[in-house]
């Protein structure tokens, strides 16, 4: 029977520098994630080991000091027989130091941090020229123990795991092992920043001027660092330098976004080197780990970006009305006018609005499903997340802002006509152009029809006047994940036809189209750019004739969550007019 091991969230207490001769080192900085568990298959192997790597330059700086122990975190103590710690130069090599702890009733293993100390501490001597693997492991009686903890911030060299076949794998793309080395001595380095990771945009658009780069910096010294410079070099020449302020305590990580202005105008592929310099506390004692390199493309321009925000919701979901209201309030803000919001009725059971493609898209969960769920441009939000629970406004805003900040390298424009003479189908054309040489090979176009103002049937926890909005009614692409787009030079054109249901209210509908990747993986569908078009903008729509010839006899106002509001309310409103001939029309109004 196939079994899986899960790395789950736990609590690891960081070892503070309480004395001048003691400090702790780790990539996880004493933190673990409250995100989704990481599933690791391990068959019938009942001993689990994890480790992180200290590079040779860091080890050399620690010469003369002693590694006295290792703090390791357990998310669960169920079925744990024993725990152990080790130091090795090779993951499958001999132990330089080892200690095994077998708990009993008077001295049990602990959920959370386990502070283990070597009986024979390891003193770092000069001359080896090698790095060290700092490890923590345990044995268990059952094969489904969810005990190992990891911080889900991916950092290179931070998470090695011995898996099902007894061999080691680098799992650093998933996060950091929640373990740390305890080091004592009178030769501890005071100033040792490490540039652990940078996230470079795939392209720099000359017309935008700035290039946001996310950085991850660890303090592997014993002294708090209060600031440093981050330099960017392109093709061997410094193009910009930004000062970063803020305390970084010993064993802590600092992450943020630096906006470089490289001033590049010639299109083409470039190599970039990042370097940490000028620590406010003095010279870095190991500058060799202050440098990382990456590549990007310089393009002449970028296109207006529209961000696709997809909510998974159903009438069975008691939390969904609250999130709908939160999204409505955010969408009313001018800074989010470029967000295209849609709703798929899947994720937690089904309702009368659920379509087959709604269920198909739940593949992006990568595991268990839930509602409300939100994905933004189908981009990864962490090592294992595309769809997240939008618990706070900040969660949503961070996702939206991160995508709004990325240059759009392809444009998306929509045109449409009703079929003649029956007008029972919609002929949609999506077109545009690209400015990048490196769009994904699997670039595809997807087209939806979306409707607002739908009366609920049995929405749980619905407030008075609740209305379903942004509902994806139909998918025009032959494949729900999009149809391949062929470029003629830098331009493309894609067309499809979509049957219309007579029950749909055309005056409440719009077309949404987007280009995205489609590499077949649950996290491989990132949206490149999107567009939206109201049915009233269709060339031969005739929607203006839907309203009655007389005067309205009733007018009601709703917010975007479907809640009826006073006629004096401000923001984005849905205005429903009922005419004397029995016809009705709903339009959006901004006040």
Image: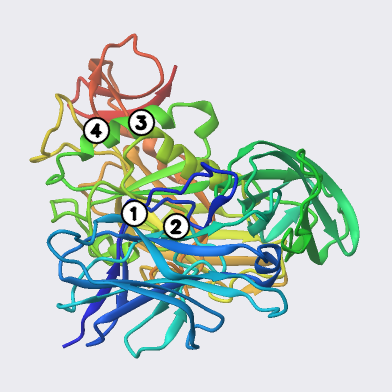
Q: Are marks 2 and 1 in contact (CB under 8 Å)?
A: yes
- The disc, 1 or 4, on the residue closer to the chain's N-terminal end is 1
Q: How far apart are labels 1 and 4 at the CA level?
A: 22 Å
Q: Are marks 1 and 3 in contact (CB under 8 Å)?
A: no
Residue 28 in the image: above or below residue 53: above
Q: Tell me where residue 424 appears, x and y as whole percent.
A: 31, 56
Is disc 1 surrounded by few (<14), some (14 to 19) or many (20+) residues within 10 Å? Answer: some
Disc on res. 328: 3
Q: Nearer the viewer, mark 1 or mark 4?
A: 1
Disc 1 target residue: 35
Disc on res. 322: 4
Q: Nearer the viewer, mark 1 or mark 3?
A: 1
SS label for mark 3: helix
Residue at x 44% of width, y 84% of height: 168
Q: Is residue 316 left or right of residue 364?
A: left
Compare residues 316 and 533 and report the one nearer the observer. Answer: 316
Q: Is residue 47 left or right of residue 197?
A: left
Disc 2 target residue: 382
- The disc, 3 or 2, on the residue closer to the chain's N-terminal end is 3
């Amino acid at each position: 029977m196939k079994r899986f091991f899960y790395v789950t969230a736990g609590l690891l207490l960081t070892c503070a520098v309480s004395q001048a001769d003691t400090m702790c080192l780790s990539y996880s900085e004493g933190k673990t994630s409250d995100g989704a568990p990481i599933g690791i298959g391990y068959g019938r192997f009942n001993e689990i080991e994890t480790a992180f790597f200290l590079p040779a330059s860091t080890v050399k700086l620690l010469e003369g000091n002693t590694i006295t122990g290792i703090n390791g975190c357990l998310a669960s103590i169920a079925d744990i027989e024993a725990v152990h710690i080790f130091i090795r130069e090779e993951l499958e090599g001999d132990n330089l130091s080892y200690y095994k702890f077998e708990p009993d009733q008077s001295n049990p293993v602990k959920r959370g941090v386990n502070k283990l100390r070597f009986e024979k501490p390891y003193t770092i001597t000069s001359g080896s020229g090698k790095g060290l693997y700092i490890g923590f492991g345990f044995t268990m009686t059952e094969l489904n123990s969810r005990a190992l903890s990891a911080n889900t911030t991916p950092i290179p060299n931070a998470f090695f795991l011995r898996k099902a076949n007894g061999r080691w794998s680098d799992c650093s793309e998933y996060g950091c092992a929640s373990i740390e080395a305890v080091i004592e001595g009178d030769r501890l380095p005071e100033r040792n920043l490490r540039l652990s990771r940078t996230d470079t945009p795939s392209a720099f658009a000359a017309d935008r001027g700035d290039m946001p780069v996310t950085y991850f910096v660890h303090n592997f010294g014993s002294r708090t660092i209060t600031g440093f410079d981050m330099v960017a070099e392109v093709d061997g020449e410094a193009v910009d330098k930004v000062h970063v302020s803020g305390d970084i305590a010993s064993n802590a990580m600092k992450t943020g976004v630096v906006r470089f202005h490289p001033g590049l105008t010639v299109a083409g592929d470039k190599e970039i080197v990042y370097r940490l310099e000028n620590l406010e506390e003095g010279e870095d004692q190991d500058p060799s780990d202050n440098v990382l390199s990456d590549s990007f493309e310089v393009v002449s321009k970028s296109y207006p970006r529209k961000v696709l925000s997809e909510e998974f919701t159903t009438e069975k979901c008691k939390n969904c009305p609250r999130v709908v209201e939160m999204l409505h309030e955010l969408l009313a803000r001018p800074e989010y006018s470029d967000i295209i919001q849609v709703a798929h009725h899947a994720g937690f059971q089904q309702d009368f609005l659920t379509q087959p493609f709604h269920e198909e898209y739940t593949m992006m969960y990568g595991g268990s499903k839930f509602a409300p769920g939100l994905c933004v441009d189908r981009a990864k939000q962490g090592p294992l997340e595309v769809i997240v629970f939008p618990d706070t406004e900040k969660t949503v805003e961070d996702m939206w802002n991160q995508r709004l900040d990325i240059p759009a390298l392809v444009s998306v424009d929509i045109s449409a006509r009703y079929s003649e003479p029956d007008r029972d189908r919609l002929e949609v054309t999506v077109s545009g152009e690209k400015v990048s040489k490196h769009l994904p090979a699997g670039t595809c176009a997807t087209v939806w029809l979306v409707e607002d103002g739908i009366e609920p049937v049995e929405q749980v926890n619905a407030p008075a006047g609740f209305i379903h909005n942004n509902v994806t009614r139909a998918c025009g692409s032959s494949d729900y994940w999009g149809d391949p787009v062929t470029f003629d030079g830098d331009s493309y054109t894609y067309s499809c036809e979509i049957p219309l249901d007579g029950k749909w209210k055309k005056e409440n509908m719009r077309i949404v189209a987007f280009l995205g990747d489609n590499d077949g993986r649950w996290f491989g569908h990132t949206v490149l750019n999107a567009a939206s078009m109201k049915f009233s903008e269709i060339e031969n729509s005739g929607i203006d004739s839907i309203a009655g010839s007389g005067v309205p006899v009733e007018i009601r106002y709703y917010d975007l969550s479907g809640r009826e509001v006073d006629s004096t309310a401000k923001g984005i409103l849905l205005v429903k007019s009922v005419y004397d001939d029995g016809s009705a029309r709903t339009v959006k109004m901004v006040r």
